[in-house]
Image (cartoon, grey):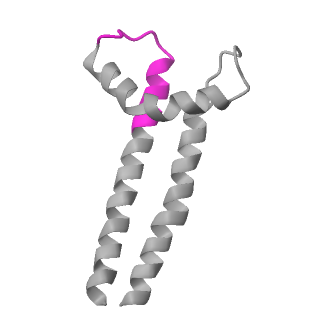
Amino acid sequence: MFILGNFLKALAAIIDIGLTFYMWVVIARAIVSWVNPDPYNPIVVFLRRATDPVLIPIRRKLPIGGMGIDFSPFIVILGIIFLQKFLVDTLYQLALRLH
C-alpha cells in the first residue's frame, strides 16, 4: 500500500504545482489587461489562450456587466486556492494514511 501512498503524494505535489502555475498565469493576465497590450504579442496571445476557457464562462455568469471591473480572475484565484486547500490536502492526508 505504500506504493499507492507514494503515488498519491506525488500526484498531490504535481497538482499543487500546476494550480500554483495557473494562478500566476491568471494574475499575469489580469495585470496585462490593465494596460493596452499589443494583441499580437506572443505572451499576450499565450495568456489569453490559457485563461479564456476558464474566465469567459465566469464572466457570462457574473451579473456585473458594464461596470468596468472584471472580477473573474479573482473568482478563478479563489477557486484555485480552494482546490489547493481541499483537493491537494486531501490527497496528502490519504497518502499518509496509506503508509
- Name the residue at 26% across, 84% down: 3
Compared across the picture, whether 22 is left or right of 81 comes to: left
Quarter where residue 40 is shown: top left
Classify the position of the N terminus by image quarter: bottom left
- Name the residue at 49% across, 27% down: 30
Q: Is residue 34 magenta?
A: yes
In this view of the protein, which residue sits in the foreground, 8 or 60?
Answer: 60
- Name the residue at 29% across, 79% down: 6
Quarter where residue 60 is shown: top right
Q: Is residue 89 magenta?
A: no
- The percent position of residue 13, horizontal first and vertical second, equals 34, 65
Tally the numbered discs.
Answer: 0
Compared across the picture, whether 73 is left or right of 68 comes to: left
- The percent position of residue 29, horizontal first and vertical second, equals 44, 27
Quarter where residue 37 is shown: top left
Compared across the picture, whether 89 is left or right of 2 comes to: right
Residue bounds of the magenta highlight: 25-40
Classify the position of the C terminus by image quarter: bottom left
- Name the residue at 32% across, 60% down: 14
- The percent position of residue 38, horizontal first and vertical second, equals 35, 9
Instruction: Name above or below for residue 31 compared with residue 9.
Output: above
- The percent position of residue 51, horizontal first and vertical second, equals 43, 32
Instruction: Name above or below for residue 45 compared with residue 16.
Output: above
Compared across the picture, whether 90 is left or right of 48 comes to: right
